[in-house]
Amino acid sequence: LSLVTLLKQNKMGNSATHRLYERIESGHMILLDTRNLHLLIQLLRDPKRTIKRLDLDGGDLTSDRTNAVLRLAEALELTSESRSSELEALYLNNFKTNNEGIRAISNFVKTSSLCTLRLENCGIDDASAFLIGESLQTNTSMKILDLDHKHENTRSL
């Protein structure tokens, strides 16, 4: 690739990242696909950007959703370690994941000052709910926890 092509791609990437940031800032739900996931991770790692609320829908992820959740959780953890995390609310919709993905989110919740966590249509079962519950032992700022009404194997916890 030529230098001009690389510069154009970088400019387009910066423009796309900026548009995504504007949509997040205005409170829009972000329909996550592989490209948006990559841009979102860039935003989370950018020390000049502050994100208070993330509302993500994984319905357009054609690849492994658990892998997407793992990458997102890793970026969130790195962000909270490198600077005081500003993220107050995290909404994940349509991220059918396994306990590995939920464990990654739980680890982030433990170390964050997250106030709201909503996991809708994420395939939360009893083991996943238990993992999230354990994370609340160290997160004292959580005020709203919504694990959706579509639990799998729902029983009293």
Image: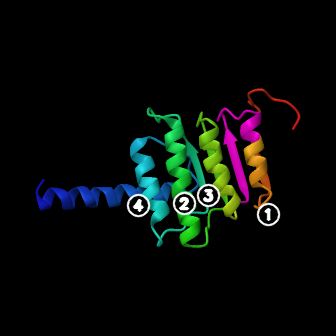
Q: Indicate whether 120 appears above or below 80.
A: above
Please give the name of the residue rendered at 39% of the width and 57% of the height, measured from the top-left corner.
17
Q: Is residue 148 visible?
A: no
Q: Secondary structure at mark 1?
A: loop
**Image marks 1 and 4: residues in contact by CB distance under 8 Å:** no
Tag 3 residue: 53
Residue assigned mark 1: 140
The residue under label 4 is which amino acid type? His
What type is the residue that disc 1 sits on? Thr
Distance in Å between CA atoms under marks 1 and 2: 25 Å
Q: Report helix, strand or loop for mark 2.
A: helix
Label 4 Cα crowd, 10 Å radius (few <14 / some 14-19 / many 20+): some
Q: Quadrant of the C terminus?
A: top right
Q: Position of residue 65 (x, y in %)?
A: 52, 37
- Residue highlighted by disc 4: 18
Q: State which tag comes first along the sequence, 3 or 4.
A: 4
Residue 137, can we see it?
A: yes
**Location of residue 87 in the rendering, given as x and y in whole percent from the top left corner:** 62, 62
Q: Report, in whole angstroms, how far the alpha carbon at label 1 lies from the one at label 4.
A: 33 Å
In the displayed structure, does residue 4 sit left or right of residue 30? left
Q: Which one is earlier in the sequence, the residue at label 1 or at label 3?
A: 3
The residue indicated by pointer 2 is 25
Residue reaching furthest to the top: 153
* Magenta run includes residue 89: no
